Image (cartoon, grey):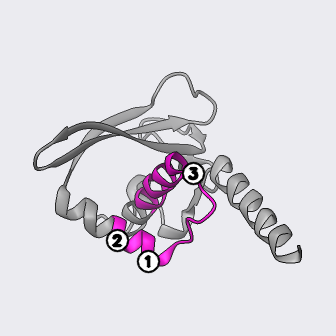
Amino acid sequence: MIQTNAPIQYWRRSNDTDVVKIEVRPDEVTPEGQWFLVIDWLMSNTKDAFFSKRVFLTNEKIDQTETYIEANYDLSGLTRIEREKRKLQIALMLDTQTNLLSDGKTIYEREPSDWEYTEDYIARQLQLEQENQENLSE
């Protein structure tokens, strides 16, 4: 989904460094909103999650975020499933870069610019841009 753009020290008790990848998965839906599972992975170990937590978003917050994303990001050319996944990725990036700690840093004491989309996101964007170019030249 998203990841640090360079290896970081991810554990305060050691000097170990790695790229941290963060994934969000939809979870339980309630009448008031939805739970999401946020999972932190190390790129060197994608079988065992490093950290995870459940996060609840109200229907109002979900609607606001979705409206913002649809108004500011091009989701054309994506299937419904791809659009929903992309919205989750964008929402995760927006939350990570703007929901700052008291010292103005993001999680893992990083700057907002220290985060990037994962390779699968970037590869699909490039594919869509190429398809759009081909369609324009026809």
User: Image height check: is 123 above or below 132?
Assistant: above
Q: Which of 75/88 is in front? A: 75
Mark 1, residue position: 71
Which residue sits at x=81%, y=70%? Answer: 135
> Does the magenta-highlighted stretch encompass residue 82?
yes
Q: Position of residue 45 (x, y in %)?
A: 59, 27
User: CB atoms at circles 1 and 2 under 8 Å apart?
Assistant: yes
Q: Which mark is residue 67?
A: 2
Q: Position of residue 27 (x, y in %)?
A: 29, 36
Q: CA distance from mark 1 to mark 2?
A: 6 Å
Q: Residues within 10 Å of mark 1 (few under 14, many from 20)?
A: few
Q: CA distance from mark 3 to mark 1?
A: 18 Å
Q: Amino acid at mark 2?
A: Thr
Q: Is residue 102 visible?
A: no
Mark 3, residue position: 79
Seen from this angle, which residue lies furthest front?
138
Q: Is residue 125 left or right of residue 72?
A: right
Q: Position of residue 70 (x, y in %)?
A: 44, 70
Element class at badge 1: helix
Which residue sits at x=48%, y=68%? Answer: 112
Q: Position of residue 36 (x, y in %)?
A: 30, 42
- Give the extent of the magenta segment: 66-93
Q: Quadrant of residue 116?
A: bottom right
State the predominant SS element of the stretch in magenta.
helix
Whichever of callouts 2 and 3 sits on the residue coming sooner in the sequence is: 2
Q: Residues within 10 Å of mark 2 (few under 14, many from 20)?
A: few
Q: Amino acid at mark 3?
A: Thr
Q: Amino acid at mark 1?
A: Ala
Element class at badge 2: helix
> Does the magenta-highlighted stretch encompass residue 6?
no
